[in-house]
Amino acid sequence: MEELKKEEILKLFGTHLKNIRNEKKISLRVLEQLSNIDYSQIHRIEKGETAPSLVTLLSLAKGLGIDPKELLDFLN
C-alpha cells in the first residue's frame, strides 16, 4: 500500500464517517446529541480538517451504535 499523507488520511476518515452517518440517516445535530460532541467538531472531522482523539472516536462510535473498529476500517 502506498504511503498516505496525513491530510489524505483525514479526508478518507472523514468521508467514511459521513457515509456511516448518512447510511444510518443521522443528522449532524442528532449525532451531536448521541455522542456528546459538538456538531461543528463532527463537521470538521467529516471534512478532514481535524483529527479526532481516541475519546472522540469512541464517542462517535457509541453515538452511531457501531463498534469502534468500524470507524477505523476506512483504508480498504
Image: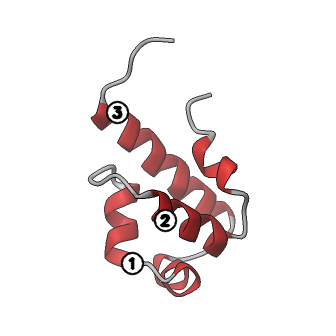
Which label's residue is closer to the chain start, 2 or 1?
1
- The circle drawn on residue 55 is 2
- At label 2, which amino acid type do we have? Val
Question: For the residues marked 3 and 1, what is the alpha-carbon distance in whole angstroms?
Answer: 22 Å
In this picture, is 69 found above or below 46? Answer: above
Q: Closer to the camera, 6 or 20? A: 6
Apparent side of residue 40 relative to residue 72 in the rendered image (left or right): left
In the structure shown, which secondary structural element does the residue marked by tag 3 occupy? helix
Which label's residue is closer to the chain start, 3 or 1?
3
Which label's residue is closer to the chain start, 3 or 2?
3
Q: Is there CB contact under 8 Å for labels 2 and 1?
A: no
Question: For the residues marked 2 and 1, what is the alpha-carbon distance in whole angstroms?
Answer: 16 Å
- In percent of width and height, residue 10 lies at 37, 43
Residue at x 69%, y 67% (from the top left corner) = 24
- Disc 3 packing (10 Å; few <14; some 14–19; many ≥20): few
Residue at x 30%, y 33% (from the top left corner) = 6
Residue under label 1, please give it. Answer: 39
Q: Nearer the viewer, mark 3 or mark 2?
A: 2
- At label 3, which amino acid type do we have? Glu
Question: For the residues marked 3 and 2, what is the alpha-carbon distance in whole angstroms?
Answer: 22 Å
- In percent of width and height, residue 22 lies at 59, 63
Residue under label 3, please give it. Answer: 8
In this picture, is 73 found above or below 5? Answer: below
In the structure shown, which secondary structural element does the residue marked by tag 2 occupy? helix
Apparent side of residue 13 relative to residue 10 in the rendered image (left or right): right
Q: Is there CB contact under 8 Å for labels 3 and 1?
A: no
